[in-house]
Amino acid sequence: MTTSTTVPVRRPRPAPAGTGRLLGAGAPDLRTHLARHGAVPAAGPRLIAEIERSGLTGRGGAAFPAYRKLAAVAAGRRAVVIGNAAEGEPASAKDRTLLTHAPHLVLDGLALAAAAVGARRAYLYLPAALVGPLRAALAERRAARVDPVPVDPVEAPDTFVAGEESAVIARIEGRPALPRDKRVRPTESGAFGAPTLVQNVETLAHLALIARHGADWFRRVGTAAQPGTFLATVSGAVARPGVYEAAYGTPVAGVLDLAGGADQALRAVLVGGYHGAWLAGGQLGAGMDRDALRPLGASPGAGVLVALPWSACGLVETSAILDYLAGQSAGQCGPCLHGLPRLAAEFGLLARRDRHVERLAQRITALAPFLQGRGACHHPDGTVRLAGSALAAFADDVSAHLAGHCVAVGRPVAGRAVVAGWSR
Amino acid sequence: MKLHVDWTACDGRGLCTELLPELLARDPWGYPVARDGTAEPAVAPHLRAHARRAVAQCPLLALRLVAR
Amino acid sequence: MASALWYAGRGTGLVALVMFTVVVLLGITTRSGRTLPGLPRFAVAALHRNVSLAAVAFLALHMLTLLGDPYAQLRLVDLVVPFQGAYRPLWLGLGTLAADLVLALVVTSLLRRRLGQRAWRAVHWLAYAAWPVALWHALGTGTDSGTAWLRAVAAGCVLAVVAAVIWRAGAGFAETGPARRRTGAVPVRRAEVRVLAATGDPRVPALRSEQHR
């Protein structure tokens, strides 16, 4: 459905108040988007300084300061910018939710980033199901002549590692979406040998708002080290699983409450996704930000929270995730290809309460040195981290399982699926 | 100077673990493991010639010396 | 003098054939990642390289002595362009062809780091073509073809290479094979998998997660 869209008069629109920044003010069509947010501001290298002031960090999981990537790419010539919406994490739905509800915010951010770094080519890397709607949004923008740099959608395969930075660049170049050996940083030489900026789409959406409303506005919520809001995908034993927006620093329990909260005490919460860590039920007052979670061995990652009730077994759930992660190895690097199935198999014995295996917990931890730092990407490292976190968070259950029983037995079963409840 | 392994190329043939036993051991599947536990083991000056040889002899060209 | 060159040509040719047979055997052993008695893996690889260079030296001698021999009627062009010879062009041409393949193998191997692994490997597979062509040339050309001793040497070479190739194609070939097969992992890109609902209900003993391996 196309309507002729004229660019509105440049009147500054009021900045979104509170934490409803991305989703609250989203609009799928260009006309509503421009009416709500105003036109895309003119941008150039000065935008990078504003981004630095804003303290915007990447929303893809690594939380790298956005201005540093922008500055590094801007220093090169004939740059390429890529918006990454691959979202290989099964427990995360924020990127596709954002692209469905506020695609023009993301595309504004992509255009602004391209202008700031002097890019000639822009790509949006996204799941197959979203390519069609995105093409429609791009057609609207082309008709309104909003984007100086044309955006090419590139389909991302539905694998866990497809969103890894070098895998993204490989796919943009037309090769399989597999991580590559790191010789030079992508900001120096990435896609087609050009300086390449790969940013998560949520980061780009925030960038689009900062360009309109400024760094001070952005810093009004969140923490000093991680300002602004983030999109959390909440699932598991909560009343209303879904994607919610919250300020960094909000206690984990507070984010769970956005999803209707848990109607019972929680045993643990998986924070950060399948490469994240388990927080015990008593630690849920910790703020969702890097500094608060680091002493607990966790980090916000891409904002994933999965609530585990007492009726579910953390070791069983972790074992299922490890099986999945082992199967999602790209298959390129020996230690990952062989080490992850071994780790998953050993953990599976523990989850199944196999009493006859000696020193099982030690055997699992003994695998860690064979998996950490040995691979083209951090898939094995993240997987080991999850396994170690589970052994620590469910230590009582480890002893129980080795003795043949489970802490969760006898508790009323609260609902069916837990970890994998987020279906597509 | 550090030894970098291109893990997408490495096939765990083990020549490097023979030529640089001070730095590398083999994991249960044949792939080299840095004895110091790092991702890129540091190459001391007296081992540089051996490291260069290991880089040259790797049948998959999976090794590189990087200045870090 | 002519007969001396003829003898030298035949002798160096035979030695080159036997040496290239050893090179093939060593190359297959190198690929297996195994040691030989008294030889660590890097030494097996080095021996493969050194014997191949020595074999090339004998091949060069073979070609040069025959160039000087009037009965062979070789011109310089026959050393590189196959099947153009005056005397027994087919059998001679096979030798030229084998020599051309060996030249490609050696040059790409000497420049391996510059060429990169993929290009080097693509050319190196031609070794499996070069050896039989050389053997065929040895059996058909020259005044010794049909003699019992040549046939015996050729049979020995064939037996050794066939046995090595059968070993190469078999399951227990690579030293690291058994350990890697035990993990059940297959190094190809698998179809993406989904975690199915791993039930939190501990009364269900088995995990219900499906995947390809």
Image (spheres, rainbow, N blue to C red):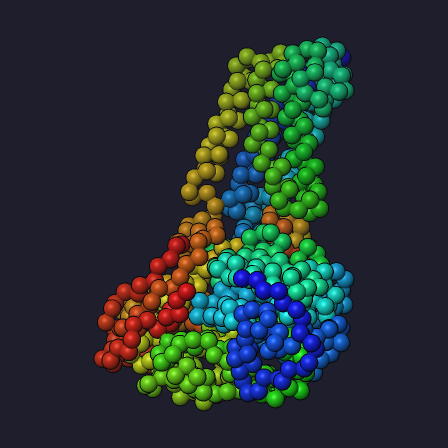
The residue lying at 64 percent from left, 82 percent from top is A13
State the quadrant of the C terminus of chain C.
bottom left
Could you tell me which residue is drawn at 63 percent across and 50 percent down? B61
Q: Position of residue A338 (x, y in %)?
A: 45, 58
Q: Is residue A346 visible?
A: no
What residue is drawn where x is 65% and y is 53%?
B55
**Is residue A127 placed above or below A418 in the rendered structure?**
above
Residue A411 at x, y = what percent?
25, 81
For the N terminus of chain C, which image quadrant? top right
Please indicate whether residue B64 sits to the left or right of residue C125 in the image.
Answer: right
Looking at the picture, tell me which residue is in the foreground, C107 or A69: A69
Closest to the observer, A88 or C21: A88
Q: Position of residue A376 (x, y in %)?
A: 57, 60
Q: Quadrant of residue A390?
A: bottom left
Q: Where A215 sits versus A416, above or below?
A: below
Quarter of image, res C203? bottom left
**Total numbered labels:** 0
Q: Is residue A285 visible?
A: yes
Task: Indicate whether A50 appears above or below A7.
Answer: below
Residue at 70% in and 30% down: C57
Q: Position of residue B42 (x, y in %)?
A: 65, 66
Q: Quadrant of residue A248?
A: bottom right
